[in-house]
Structures are given as C-alpha cells and as structure tokens.
Image (cartoon, rainbow, N blue to C red):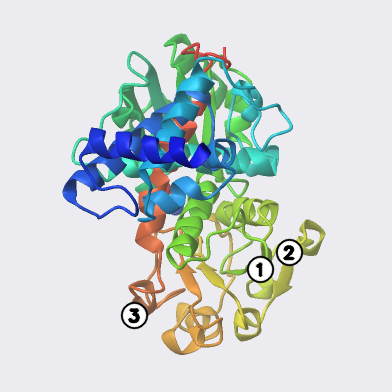
Amino acid sequence: MVEWAISLAERLWAWRTRIPTGRLVKSNLQRRSMQDLLHEIEQFCLRNGMSETRFGELALNDKPFVSQLKSGRDLRGSTAVRLRQFMAEYEAGQLAKPSSSGRFAAGKLAFPHRDLLGISQLERHEILYVLDQAEPWIDLNRQSSKHADLLAGLTIINAFFENSTRTLLSFEIAGKRLGADVVNMHAAQSSVKKGETLIDTAITLNAMRADAIVIRHASSGATQLIASKVDCPVLNAGDGQHEHPTQALLDALALRHALRERGEAAEDFTGLTVTICGDVLHSRVARSNLLCLQALGATVRLCAPPALMPAGVEALGAQPFHDFDAALADSDVVMMLRLQTERMQGQFIASAREYHHLYGLTKERLKRAAPDALVMHPGPMNRGVEIDSDVADMIDRSIITRQVEMGLAIRMACLDILTRRARQVEGWA
Ligand code: CP
C-alpha cells in the first residue's frame, strides 16, 4: 500500500514536471524544478524562522539534506512531494511545531538579542542560527537579480569612525539588497571633527529614528556605549581591540562552505585546528574568531611575537605560540592577521623584513600545515609582510575572496534578524 502510494506520488510528480520517474536526469527542466523547490524551502525557512538544517531534520530526518541538494544531490519525485506536503502541513498547523529543545527555538528565542555587539554575547546555537540564516542570501547574491524587499521602509545608518572597505561596503550593499534606505556617516565629514562627543552623536542618530545603526569605532566599548543611548538595534562593525563579530561569523560561514565543498560537511568545527597568526594583541578579529571558532568546537592556536601576544590567552582556552613553524604543524586552517600599525604606540617589531622572515606565510612554510590546509585573511592584506602573494592567491587553498562574499550574506542575515522586532515578524515582535 505504501509502495503504491509512493509510486503514484512519483508519477504525479513526473507528470507535473514532465520528467521521468526514478533517479532524475539533470535536464534544464529538472534543474529549474530543483531551483523552484529550493526557493520554496528557503522562503518557508525564512517565514518560519527555521534553519535549513532543522528543515532537513524535521521534514526528512536528514539534517544536511538541503545543503546536499544545493551541492547537486539528486532528488526523487516522491521526496519532492513529501517536502512540499511537509511545508503545507506545517504552515497549516497540522504538525506539532518544534519545541525549544530542538536545535533552534521558534521565533525570537532563536536569537533573543536586540544588538550584535560581540561574539561573547552569543551561545553556540545562536551562532549556528545566524550562519544558517545567511545561507539563502548567498544564493540570492549569486543571481542576476539580487533584490529582496524585506526591509523596505527601514532606515539603516552606517556610522564609521574608522576607515573600512569590506565592512562598510558590505553593510551598505546588504541593507540596499534587502530594500532598506541606507545612509553612511563618515566621521571625517561629521561634527565629530568639531568636537561633538560620541554620546551626542548617538543621541543625534537616535533622533533621526534609524531602524538599525552599524558602528565602527577606534575605541573598545564604543558600540556598547552607543547601544545604551539609542532605541534601535546596534551592530558592532569593529570596536578598537575588542570585537568584530560579523567578521568572525563570515569567517565561520566561509570555512563551513569550503569544508562542505571538500565533502567534509559537519555540524560544526569539532576536530579542526585553526592557527591565527599575526598581531594578536591589537586584533579584534582574533578575539572574535577565537570565541566563535571555540564555540563551534575548533581548537585554536594563537601565534605572535612575544610583544604582540596579549597576556592570559591560555585562560581563554587558546594555545599560545611564538614559533610560527611549530604552530603550523598539522593545522587545518591558517588565518593570517595584518600588523595594525595604526594601533601601535611604540616599536613592536624590529622591521617588516624580519617580521616576514619569522611570521610571514610563504608557500614553503605552508607545507608544515596539514596537506590541504586552508588559508584565510580578514583583509586588508599587506602582501609580502604577513602573507606572500603566491599563498594569498592560491586557488585551491586560499578562501580570502570567499570570506568577502560571505560577509555580504552574513550582514544581510544580521540586519534581517535584528530588525524582525521592528517589522513585527510573527514570533519576533
Ligand atoms: N576585515 C575588515 O574589517 O576589513 P575593512 O577594514 O576593510 O572593513
């Protein structure tokens, strides 16, 4: 009886899509049907605040199903029918909703924060939630038409008190792709130059009724201060030496995708050894990545000259190294950091030449890491200082440009999630 029902469903599906039953031939028509289905799943997940992993688990008891489908896994007609039936019944309230004991709680419990100030405020499941929420935006950004109207009518202010290329541009593009009005405030052209305090600037931005404010500032804690003075969500785009949470999230997403492409798809980074090397002392990227990677199960090694290693990193669970060659041994991922001379007061290294000799990532030195070790860098890079060009541009090992791509998707996900309350999205208001 069950077999008969499945066979009938397969024939019905084949009739609807005019494709043969059984293992499907990858015709253009089938590809289009697959894209339609994936689009339906993405929209369903967005509407219901459900991750695609959770969707796979609930609909088919197969967590990686959707990501495998995106990577080209074949789909039987009967499975497509089951997935559509699941979505229809779920939204019609005919299925028990997942409880908060599931991977993600429903609605705002999945991410109960008004602001995104640091990775230190996030639980492991909240980090995974943001990563999963970014997945549909990666696909949208790869299409010729890249618009969604989710944030139509909202105003986002990017207040950057420090220089930026990647973060500012990607927050601006993210907001615009989601349909928001985006305004950039550059400190160099603002009344900060006339002596206005940070608090007065925050009060001014608040009076303009922004729906989200993205802040980059040279002082650690500046974003927290602004968040305490305004009524809308605040996103930290880098504050001094403290945190750069969206950088760590985009790094995790880039790593997840690179591993997935190698067939090493896993729930998290358990078993992975990541070496972060460079000016750890002045790096908010190192701090946010340490917290994020550890939350996702990775072992993190921090490598720096003694003068550029903060005290007490062992207490944070990191393994400190001053010898880069030793740190690299068997590392699965090598994340290089720039020397942040703008934050240095005094002489921290003898010369760029000596620094490169001891801590620069060269092709020869990379051989000490695991055979397929991935190379990352948050940018901006100083080629020939912390990283050689022939390593930064290695097609099969460097995921530096992928990090930039994922930055856009992560920032779209963060803006979406943090404005759901203002948009009165069901379950989030
Ligand atoms: N990684 C990073 O924050 O780059 P920008 O300084 O260009 O924003």
**Separation of disc 2 and disc 1 at Cα?**
6 Å
User: Going 39% across and 77% down the picture, which residue do you hit?
Assistant: 391
The vertical placement of 95 against 138, above or below, is above
Q: Residues within 10 Å of mark 1 (few under 14, many from 20)?
A: many
User: Going 69% across and 34% down the picture, which residue do you hit?
Assistant: 102
Q: Is residue 400 left or right of residue 259?
A: left
- Disc 1 target residue: 302
In what element is the residue under mark 2? loop
**Separation of disc 1 and disc 3 at Cα?**
23 Å
Instruction: Say if mark 2 contacts mark 1, CB within 8 Å.
Output: yes
Instruction: Say if mark 2 contacts mark 3, CB within 8 Å.
Output: no
In what element is the residue under mark 3? helix
Query: Percent x, y for residue 389?
Result: 34, 76
In what element is the residue under mark 1? strand
Query: Percent x, y for residue 400?
Result: 39, 62
- Disc 3 target residue: 390
- Disc 2 target residue: 318
Q: Residues within 10 Å of mark 2 (few under 14, many from 20)?
A: some
Query: Percent x, y for residue 27?
Result: 19, 52
Query: Percent x, y for residue 373?
Result: 51, 76
Q: Quadrant of residue 36?
A: top left
